[in-house]
Amino acid sequence: MALLLVACLSLVSSQGVIGSQTFENGSKCIENCGTLYVTTNTGEEKTYTGTKRKMRQKNVAKVRVVGTGCFLIHKERGFSGENFLVQGSKEHDLRENGHDWTTVKSVEYSLDCQFGARKAGAALYVIAGVGGLVVVICGLLVLKKKLEMRRRGGETVVAQQDGTSNLQEDSSIIRNTGEQEC
């Protein structure tokens, strides 16, 4: 029984991933992560593992992945600007794939080649804009309600005990006789 428990615990990583899957922890790659091979215009080859928000690799001509997963290389820092998905063990020439940029400034790694997780949700500025719009609309509704109350405030009918009504606006007294005039 204890041997079975030890075997089960060895399959579960600190991130809760079962099995010997490779995974990414922040910007550091753990265990059997894929490696990005970058070949420059001069033929020099450099390797990268994991996600890098800020980096600079100039004169990039070709890229390929060795191992598991995919890389999304970006022209700008912070995973912005033009990008190119590097997957499979085939070597990819950036120019042949329609890219004229040769400097890579950020790299994202994904074990399952799904880079949409942060793009799937709404951007922070969209959430803030919608929240601001809701606040403005609520403020306008409150203002409208206050203006209506002021307008009605001069015409409020005050009931008196003797069966008469008093309009505050013109101070005339109307007797309630039960008859209706046309």
Image (cartoon, helix red, strand yellow):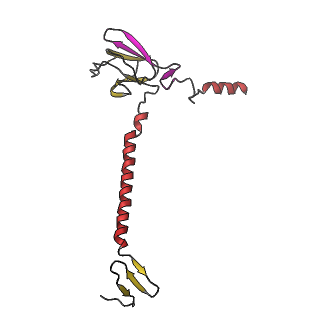
Task: From this view, report whether residue 173 is shown above or below residue 169.
Answer: below
| Residue 175, picture quadrant | bottom left
Residue 109 coordinates in the image, percent (x, y)? 44, 24
Task: From this view, report whether residue 145 is shown above or below residue 88.
Answer: below
Residue 9 appears left or right of 109: right
At horizontal 38% and vertical 60% (from top left) the residue drawn is: 142
Quadrant location, the N terminus: top right
Is any part of residue 180 visible from this angle? yes
| Residue 125, picture quadrant | top left
Q: How many marks?
A: 0
Specify start and end residues of the magenta stretch as a single range: 21-50
Seen from the viewer's position, the closer of residues 85 and 50 is: 50
Is any part of residue 91 visible from this angle? no
At horizontal 37% and vertical 47% (from top left) the residue drawn is: 130
Residue 51 appears left or right of 76: right
Residue 10 part of the magenta segment = no
Seen from the viewer's position, the closer of residues 91 and 61 is: 61
Residue 31 part of the magenta segment = yes
At horizontal 38% and vertical 27% (from top left) the residue drawn is: 79
| Residue 98, picture quadrant | top left
Seen from the viewer's position, the closer of residues 91 and 134 is: 134
Residue 23 coordinates in the image, percent (x, y)? 51, 25
Residue 40 appears left or right of 35: left
Residue 18 coordinates in the image, percent (x, y)? 57, 28
